[in-house]
Amino acid sequence: MKKVCMFGLGFVGLPLALSFSMRGCEVVGVDIEADLVEDLNNGVTHHLENYEGKPIQEILSEQLAAGRFKAIANGAAAMQECDNIIVTVGIPVEDYEHDMTPLIEVCRTVGQGLKMGDLVLIRSTVIPGTTKDIIMPLLEKESGLKAGVDFYLAYSSERIAEGKAFHEFENMPAALAGINPESTQKAFELMSIVTKAPIAQASRMEVVEAAKVMENISRDVDIAMVNEFAKFCKAMGVDIFELVSIANTHDRVNLLTPGPGVGGYCLPNALFYLLPKAKELDVNLELLSTARRVNEDMPRYVANLVLRNLPVAPGLAKIAVFGLAMKDYSNDDRVSPAHSVVSNLIDAGCEVKAFDPAVPEDYDFKVDSIEDAVKDAHGIVVLTKQNGIDYMDLDRFYGLMSKEGTPFIVDTKNLYEPELVNGKGFKLERL
Ligand SMILES: NC(=O)c1ccc[n+]([C@@H]2O[C@H](COP(=O)([O-])OP(=O)(O)OC[C@H]3O[C@@H](n4cnc5c(N)ncnc54)[C@H](O)[C@@H]3O)[C@@H](O)[C@H]2O)c1
């Protein structure tokens, strides 16, 4: 069975590493975060993944016990043990600027340990052209070996959604291209151990790299469109959620669901992987940039829905926030629109108490129970659906909340029927 080295043990790398080990491969996972490596070797992870109902925590423990998975921080040592190297370290974006450093660092380590006949498969989301123009020369320089001759090099986009990782590694159609046909074939054989769905083979790695970025941006644009429709509907007094369900009875229309914004590592970053290349090629991406701005503005819009319902001045207001994750049923709050809603409210002077049982990170405004969030609050804003929050416990919320004015709920998730909520004594403001 194959020996696989997985660089990066985050939301993609860990479940992917376990997907290979579950199928008999010997997998060494590499991550620079020493605490993460230690936790994983002790069977601890906060991820909310499962395979056919079996939680990732159980899968991790089983694979550790079977000796098929281990995590280490020393990439050079891992490279000695394996000949199939998969890279899942991403390109962070900060203040609209991408940072290649982590990906360059990881490729330098891979290059230094590269052996004749190794396969390097890049699965990170990248600026189109990165694998051939940046990674390949780096690997060649560090190793003294030639891509496509001495080692195989390929790119395959990662399409999973967090929370469905195991299922989607197996069942989501994938896309792949190599530096030469032999590399494509080698990568195809490796991926086929986990992926049972079709694996489309493209003529060039750039096609797959660019397609991945555009797949993400297309969702960002679709969501921006429906978020703009939501603003229009609100002004007109029409329920956007009802409108979406009516519009989608059209066979060729598929409006997505509006929400408090677009978060996570993937969708908001995608444009900033395309823009640098577009600038280099002198291509104007006006629509895409506008869509990004629309989604980025949604948290401010949602915060304003809260502020306009306050019965007291913002400086005296207490707000309960339900859900901090970047999307429903996720523990990932990176680039979460919920954080922007919270900052908007805090900047306006409100006291915010947020509850999200799935998100492990601590923040000053985060509390450990729904009671702590709701107690004495003037209003609730629902930003994310999570297991572990009983959104329908309205009588209890009402009992705990401030009666200075009418308690209100801002519902960005279409959870509440107006009649029910109004009947319980709340004002309801939907997106
Ligand atoms: N999260 C998703 O749902 C998702 C979906 C599709 C594609 N992607 C893409 O997959 C890639 C990984 O995303 P993620 O969400 O798993 O990121 P992540 O931040 O959860 O994981 C990346 C891991 O890489 C580690 N790392 C950084 N530098 C390293 C180095 N030099 N050596 C070893 N490890 C190193 C980090 O410590 C981190 O644990 C990104 O390119 C992302 O855009 C993510």
Image (cartoon, grey):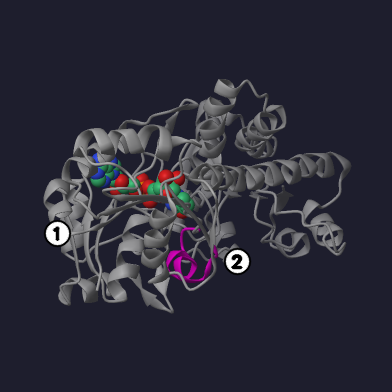
**Which residue is more in the foreground, 387 or 204?**
204
The magenta stretch spans which residues? 161-173
Write the residue at 85% across / 64% down.
Answer: 251
Residue 127 is situated, as x and y percent measured from the top left of the image, at 48, 35
Find out whether the residues at labels 2 and 1 contact each other: C-beta distance under 8 Å.
no
The residue that label 2 is drawn on is 392
Query: Is residue 316 visible to the viewer in this orientation of the structure?
Result: no
Query: Is residue 136 visible to the viewer in this orientation of the structure?
Result: yes
Residue 143 is situated, as x and y percent measured from the top left of the image, at 20, 39
The residue that label 1 is drawn on is 81
Q: Quadrant of the N terminus?
A: bottom left
Q: Earlier in the sequence, mark 2 or mark 1?
A: 1
Q: Answer few, some or many: residues within 10 Å of disc 1's Cα (few below 14, many 20 plus, some between 14 and 19).
A: some
Residue 162 is situated, as x and y percent measured from the top left of the image, at 46, 58
- Nearer the observer, disc 2 or disc 1? 1
Write the residue at 88% across / 42% down.
Answer: 236
In the displayed structure image, the side of residue 1 where residue 127 appears, left or right: right
In the displayed structure image, the side of residue 290 where residue 374 appears, left or right: left
Label 1 residue SS: helix
Write the residue at 82% across / 61% down.
Answer: 248
Q: Answer few, some or many: residues within 10 Å of disc 2's Cα (few below 14, many 20 plus, some between 14 and 19).
A: few
**Three-letter code, disc 1:** Glu
**Which residue is more in the foreground, 365 or 79?**
79
Quadrant hosting residue 394 = bottom right
Alpha-carbon span between mark 2 and mark 1: 53 Å
**Three-letter code, disc 2:** Met
The answer to if 162 sits in the magenta stretch is yes
In the displayed structure image, the side of residue 202 where residue 103 appears, left or right: left
Write the residue at 86% across / 49% down.
Answer: 238
Residue 146 is situated, as x and y percent measured from the top left of the image, at 28, 41
